[in-house]
């Protein structure tokens, strides 16, 4: 998996500045990952339904299950089946609304063997933060911080979490 994220470079200066700006924020962060080496074709949709239940919000579950189902449909295309890279997909969705930040960043890979069984690998990083001062009043971020968060910080937190979970060897800083 690390090869699919190895090309991402993080600007350390931006990540450090946003870390300072987010000091005191309520942060909820998790990595959900799984490997299913051999799912029979007729049980695939059941696997997707069970996978959806591992997520705390509908948006997060929908992103992953939609990716799984799209790639499952693509597997019928013989031209695509020749390349294992065709079944690797990175997705991301991030929002900065007022004093709330959220990010969903992940990886999905499918492969079908000669018996028709499907191997699935996925890892999803979910990040939520709510900005508040010591008196629990909302804090608004400046335009500069919002841009740094959207361009760099969500990816940085994802890579940091993947590294912590053994899914990535190193983070490339520029």
Image (spheres, rainbow, N blue to C red):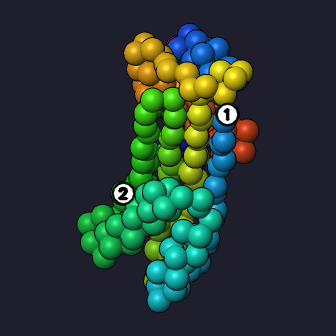
Between tags 1 and 2, which lies in front? 1
User: Which is nearer the eye, 152 or 37?
Assistant: 152
Q: Image quadrant of residue 87?
A: bottom left
Q: Residue at x 41, y 52 (%)?
A: 89
Q: Is residue 168 left or right of residue 97?
A: right
Q: Which residue is drawn at 48% across and 24% down?
A: 149
Mark 1 and mark 2: Cα distance apart in space? 38 Å
Residue 91, above or below 139? below
Mark 1–mark 2 contact, CB under 8 Å? no
Whether residue 113 is visible, yes or no, is: no
Q: Which residue is drawn at 58% across and 12% down?
A: 17
> Is disc 1 placed on a helix, strand or loop?
strand
* For marks 1 and 2 on the same chain, the one whose residue lies earlier in the sequence: 1
> Is disc 2 placed on a helix, strand or loop?
helix
The furthest residue to the bottom: 42
Residue 19, above or below 89? above
What residue does disc 2 label?
86
Q: Which mark is residue 82?
A: none
User: Which is nearer the eye, 40 or 30?
Assistant: 30
Q: Residue 26 carries which label?
A: 1
What percent of the width, then of the height, locates residue 83?
Answer: 37, 59
């Amino acid at each position: 998996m690390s090869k699919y994220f190895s090309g991402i470079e993080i600007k350390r200066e931006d990540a450090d500045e946003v870390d300072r700006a987010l000091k005191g924020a309520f942060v909820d962060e998790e990595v959900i990952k799984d490997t299913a080496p051999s799912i029979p074709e007729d049980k695939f949709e059941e696997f997707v339904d069970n996978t959806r239940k591992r997520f705390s919000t509908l948006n997060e579950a929908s992103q992953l299950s939609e990716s799984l189902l799209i790639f499952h449909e693509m597997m019928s295309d013989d031209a695509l089946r020749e390349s294992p890279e065709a079944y690797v997909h990175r997705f991301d969705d991030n929002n900065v609304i007022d004093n709330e930040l959220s990010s969903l960043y992940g990886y999905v890979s499918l492969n079908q063997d000669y018996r028709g069984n499907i191997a699935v690998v996925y890892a999803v990083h979910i990040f939520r933060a709510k900005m508040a001062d010591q008196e629990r009043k909302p804090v608004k971020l400046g335009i500069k911080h919002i841009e740094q968060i959207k361009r760099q910080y969500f990816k940085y937190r994802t890579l940091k979490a993947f590294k912590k979970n053994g899914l990535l060897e190193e983070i490339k800083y520029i």
